């Protein structure tokens, strides 16, 4: 078996970098985004574009310069609070951004990274619709006997570096008692598929939205298993539960229970009800078409609305009530 060598990577490895938050809306051609991965799924509203995620989205050089009052992540991307563009100003509420609901909660309560950094504007943030969630995957070679996280003891594991999946995976190793028993392979996640195929690692962790491209590729070339979590383990992680449906990956004979970090598209209460209604209605109307372009959109279902722990925009609420989609009183 040849030693595992790290190959250089370009841009972001996977969609899980959305944890650092992207601004995704603007008007006119000068506010479109380019992405390192597949073409972005999008919703066209009149002359504007709501570009709703892709793999590793970035600003196209010079076309967008957003500046936020607070940074919702640690990657230099701004939340879009009090945005300014090209030396001008943009009306408060005339944009959409994405982030985990938990982070909005911390901002509004002045907790965590927002301690002593509160802003009255945080109270005006309103949810529109869920988008593909970060989904924890533990992918192991089928011939290594790994059926539970505890089975990683004595095995080699690739976590990656600095991503949500890497940090979450390291946390789970500690929670499930194998932190000091696993041989961690210190290379980038982009090496995972080749490494597991060649037998250089026993397993890897990734947090791409299902179906995660690197898991699809690994399962297509090697006999692998996606290792789930028990209900007790999910409760210990303090994350939301998510089911990866049977047959999502080659050789996956049963549904897999795992954890997720929900991600939601947000605006503010300054956005008019009619605009929020139209954005939300168009998003759901085009979800099936987006799924044909990028399969992880299949994971966005009305059930994900229950993961929104913050207030939903009244315009979006109107659409959900029309469609008979269940909402909680605290969301309205």
Image (cartoon, rainbow, N blue to C red):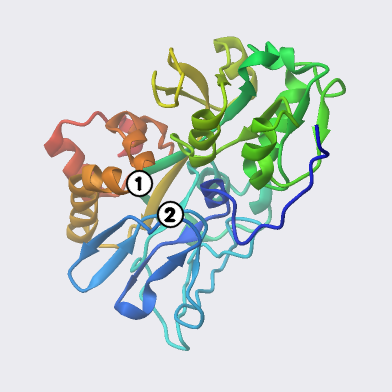
Residue extending farthest to the right is: 180
Q: In the picture shown, does residue 41 fall above or below 219?
A: below
Residue 54 in percent (x, y) is at 43, 54
- Between 187 and 310, the one lying in front of the other is 187
Measuring 49% from the left and 18% from the top, which residue is drawn there? Answer: 257
Residue 153 in percent (x, y) is at 80, 16
Residue 23 lies in what quarter of the image? bottom left
Q: Name the mark on residue 294.
A: 1
Which mark is first along the chain, 2 or 1? Answer: 2
Circles 1 and 2 in contact, beta carbons < 8 Å: yes
Q: Residues within 10 Å of mark 2 (few under 14, many from 20)?
A: many
Q: In the picture shown, does residue 66 fall above or below 299?
A: below
Measuring 38% from the left and 40% from the top, which residue is drawn there? Answer: 296
Q: Secondary structure at mark 1?
A: loop
Residue 270 visible (yes or no): no
Left or right, 23 with respect to 276, comes to right
Give the Cα distance between marks 1 and 2. Answer: 9 Å
- Residue holding disc 2: 54
Q: Nearer the viewer, mark 1 or mark 2?
A: 1
- Between 98 and 110, the one lying in front of the other is 98
Residue 67 lies in what quarter of the image? bottom right
Q: Secondary structure at mark 2?
A: loop
Please state, as top left, top right, bottom left or bottom right, where the C terminus lies in the image: top left
- Between 166 and 146, the one lying in front of the other is 146
Measuring 67% from the left and 31% from the top, which residue is drawn there? Answer: 196
């Amino acid at each position: 078996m040849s030693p595992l060598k790290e190959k250089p990577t370009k841009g972001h490895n996977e969609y899980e970098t959305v944890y650092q938050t992207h601004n995704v809306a603007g008007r006119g051609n000068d506010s479109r985004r380019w992405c390192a991965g597949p073409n972005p799924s999008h919703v066209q509203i009149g002359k504007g574009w709501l570009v709703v995620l892709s793999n590793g989205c970035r600003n196209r050089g010079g076309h967008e310069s957003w500046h936020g009052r607070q940074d919702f992540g640690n990657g230099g991307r701004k939340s879009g609070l009090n945005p300014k563009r090209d030396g001008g100003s943009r009306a408060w509420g005339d944009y959409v951004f994405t982030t985990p609901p938990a982070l909005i909660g911390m901002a509004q309560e002045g907790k965590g990274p927002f301690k002593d950094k509160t802003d009255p504007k945080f109270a005006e943030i309103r949810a529109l619709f869920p988008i593909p969630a970060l989904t924890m995957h533990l992918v192991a070679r089928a011939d290594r006997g790994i059926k539970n996280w505890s089975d990683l003891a004595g095995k080699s594991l690739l976590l990656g570096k600095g991503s949500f999946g890497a940090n979450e995976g390291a946390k789970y190793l500690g929670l499930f008692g194998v932190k000091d028993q696993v041989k961690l392979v210190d290379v980038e996640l982009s090496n995972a598929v080749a490494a597991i195929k060649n037998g250089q690692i026993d397993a890897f962790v990734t947090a791409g939205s299902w179906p995660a491209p690197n898991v699809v590729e690994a399962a297509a070339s090697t006999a692998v298993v996606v290792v789930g979590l028990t209900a007790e383990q999910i409760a210990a992680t303090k994350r939301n539960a998510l089911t990866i449906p049977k047959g999502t990956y080659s050789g996956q004979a049963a549904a897999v229970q795992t954890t997720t970090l929900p991600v939601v598209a947000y605006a503010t209460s300054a956005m008019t009800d009619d605009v929020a209604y139209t954005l939300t209605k168009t998003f759901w109307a085009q979800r099936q078409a987006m799924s044909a372009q990028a399969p992880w959109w299949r994971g966005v279902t009305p059930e994900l609305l229950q993961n929104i722990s913050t207030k939903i925009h009244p315009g979006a609420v109107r659409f959900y009530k029309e469609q008979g989609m269940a909402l909680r009183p605290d969301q309205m």
